[in-house]
Amino acid sequence: MWIRLLKSLQVPAAVLAFSCITFGQTYGTPGYSPGAWKPEELPKELSKPKPFNPHDLSGVWSTPTTPGYFERHSLDDKWIDVKDKKVPPQMRSNTTPRR
Amino acid sequence: MTDWGKAKFDANKVSYGPRAVEPELNNDPVSQCEPLGYPRDLWEANLRPFEFIQTPDRMLQHMQYHDVWRTIWTDGRALPKDPDPAWYGYAIGRWEGDTFVVESIGYDDRTWLDHFGNPHSDQMRLIERWRRVDKDTLTLDMTLTDPKTYTKPWVAETIKFVNPKAAIFEEICSPSEEHRFNNEIRDESKAISKP
């Protein structure tokens, strides 16, 4: 049973263990698309800043992934304070429609 | 929530939050590679960004997951009168000062609003107010109206998006890979939790 459990956790554990490294190398590198062009292969002009225009929404957008940031998973999403530390993080948030 | 909405909510078996069931018992459409739909796709933006591309007559919202393209028409057309339901609905947009206002309808009610199983019907109407507050920050205020599901409009808290300075990359939900994941990880949990 334990061998089966450990085997099933190998892949997720590896993904979690290396996710910081992976995203540290990809997100934050201007114009870099994982598995495709390396930063040094891109035209230098791409890294030049463009003037700010509030009517230009173009670009790639994501929600912050800084450590400790509570990720939004719905229109509203509330952190539930669960005393039991064994409860995994994905069980600690919930959303309820406003009435 | 209306009685119709509550019944649908109760039928949705989720993998997150206090209503979570064991992994192999969930019926989240995403577990079968079904489309996330909108606005649920937005909540994926912590790991799966989206991209806005502006053209003279439309705004394209390119979602990384499933490589989905949502079209927001800006050519002056009105919303369709009686559209066939669509996974990503039908959207029109206009500028009000520095705010890009998007109205949309015609959503397929097979999608969930979020991974907590909150439902919506084909009467869902979204109003999104997008603002680029500075070079690297975008904010969104969204109001969901769906009288078949919710007794009052659902006004979301402001959502902040940042520019990750990265490109969208291919991330397709492959049914065969999802099936393998279900067999080897999700269904495996049944044997672990019930020895």
Image: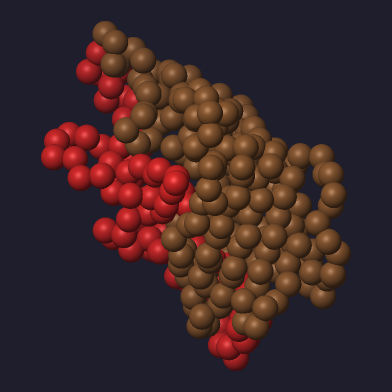
Q: Quadrant of the C terminus of chain B?
A: top left
Q: Residue at x 26, y 58 (%)?
A: A68
B35 or A18: which is nearer to us? B35
| Horizontal side, residue A26 vs residue A19: left or right | right
Q: As displayed, is residue A78 above or below residue B10? A: below
Q: Is residue A70 left or right of residue A34?
A: left
Residue A63: x and y in percent read: 45, 62
Question: In the shown orientation, is residue B50 left or right of residue A28?
Answer: right
Chain whose colour in the figure is red:
A
Q: Measured from the top left, where is residue B120 in percent x and y? A: 59, 39
**For this view, does B18 lie left or right of residue B59?**
left
- Frontmost residue, A84 versus B5: B5
The x and y percentages for residue A36 are 60, 60
Q: Is residue A33 visible?
A: no
The answer to whether B132 is drawn above or below residue B155 in the figure is below
Q: How is the image coloured?
A: by chain
The image quadrant of residue B107 is top right
Q: Position of residue B5 (x, y in %)?
A: 54, 32
User: Which residue is outermost to the top?
Assistant: B195
Which of the pair B51/B104 is nearer the observer? B104
Q: Colour of chain B?
A: brown
Asked if one can make out residue B145 in the rendered structure from this viewpoint, the answer is: yes
> Measuring 61% from the left and 44% from the top, which residue is drawn there?
B146
Specify the quadrant of the image occupied by residue B71: bottom right
Instruction: Please determine whether, in this image, residue A63 is positioned above or below residue B10.
Output: below
For the point 71% across and 55% down, which residue is it?
Answer: B104
Question: Which residue is located at x 33 percent, y 49 percent?
Answer: A78
